[in-house]
Amino acid sequence: MRTLRIVISVILILVSLGLLAFSAAFLFHAFPRDTAPQTQDTTQEVPDTPADEPETAEESPAPAPSQPEPEPEEEPAAEEPSEPDTTDTDDAAAYIQEYLAAMTTEEKVWQLFITTPEGLTGVTTATQAGETTRAALAQRPVGGICYFAANLVDRAQTISMLENTQSYAKTPLFLGVDEEGGRVSRAGSNEAMGVTHFEAAATYGARADMAEVYQVGSTLASELSALGFNVDFAPVADVVTNPNNTEIGDRSYSDDPQVAAAMVSAMVDGLQRGGMVSCLKHFPGHGSTETDSHQGKSVSNRTVEELESCEWIPFQAGIDKGAAMVMVSHLTNENLSDLPADLSPEVIGYLRGELGFDGLIVTDSHQMGAITDYYTSGEAAVLALKAGVDMVLMPMDLQDAFDGVMDALEDGTLTQARIDESVLRILAVKYSFGILA
């Protein structure tokens, strides 16, 4: 009996040991062991890339510790800036030089004038362009024509007149208009023209909104181009420093030169980005005068230092923005010259030198009293060209102005080189604005 109990006890011990062994085996396989090497879970999510940093490609595994860390690659050296491609510029210069070389002296001299359609043809009021205009341009191939409200009856008539006029010209014409807004709005003041009539410059200057003024220029460029114009004699860059000034008044953006400069810059940008030649006026600044130069001699006593700190700031802003043309007034600034500004080498010298303007310089109208009271058309044209002006606007007698220049070439008062210098500028502006193809 005792032996039987021993046997049963041994059997129970063995069964217990078996159960313990089975439990240990089960637990061994059911849970990971801390001492075994873990493998990377390839389905693990990559942390979100911060929104302000670009996502990068997946990195390669780091080298084993026994291998040396690779040297970081050197960043490639910055490339030297390439030389600007001047091929197009060189081609344009060559084309313009060839064009100039093919012109006769007479053709070159005629290019120096912008006239009215009446001055060209001799008619009382021109509202169409037909055989009379064709014959006049064949005889007098001027550089440009300026139109006024009386020439602009309606949209269809204007488009036809300008299209015909341009088609008759051997050398394509500047076709210009005074479209400033306000009281100087040759097309916009006539609803039949379909051109927006903008407010006077002073209104925009008071708001000092460059974006608004840029849009004015852009809109005018589009609307005037659609009619056939390619020059807008705008903006007025004068700063009114004399409250009694009536010739400029609200045509100026502001009596603050910095505000005026910002507005002028925006207007030039809007016009010229739209393909319209912009003409700053009236250098060296007409805001300090009282007499209207349409009526007679107008005098300013502003010093160079005063002009630099006020009147010339808007002109410089427009020039820096790329204005293609600057109009010089007839005022006489006695601290600069005894001559009207557009006949004065000293005034033109400041514009070319101090302000760095290398574009087209045009006179104000030579039908104004400040010129006609003292000079013949021929005398005024020669003096303007001698001073360094490129184009004479609206001589009172176009033929006399042309003859005066031809006589000055013959007697040596003017040289062929001086004429060629201005004609090259005229052709260059026409080329750059797509007028001369």
Image (tube, helix red, strand yellow):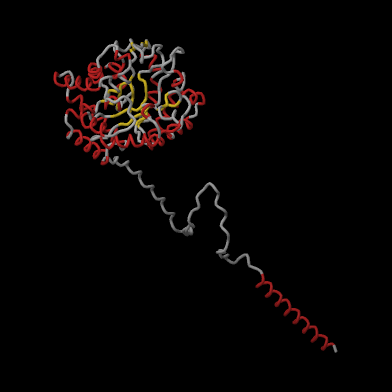
Up-down relation of residue 102 to residue 149 (above or below): below
Relative image position of residue 223 (x, y in whole percent): 41, 35
Q: Quadrant of the N terminus?
A: bottom right
Q: Residue at x 44, y 54 (%)?
A: 69
Q: Which residue is drawn at 21% across and 32% down?
A: 138
In the picture, residue 80 is in which quadrant?
A: top left
Regarding residue 233, the answer to whether it shows in the image is no
Q: Which residue is drawn at 14% across and 18% down?
A: 411
Q: Residue at x 44, y 58 (%)?
A: 67
In the picture, residue 303 is in which quadrant?
A: top left
Regarding residue 105, the answer to whether it shows in the image is yes
Q: In which quarter of the image is the C terminus?
A: top left
Relative image position of residue 180 (x, y in whole percent): 42, 26
Report whether 84 appears left or right of 186: left
Up-down relation of residue 28 to residue 433 (above or below): below
Front residue of this view, candidates 400 and 334: 400
Report whether 55 appears left or right of 309: right
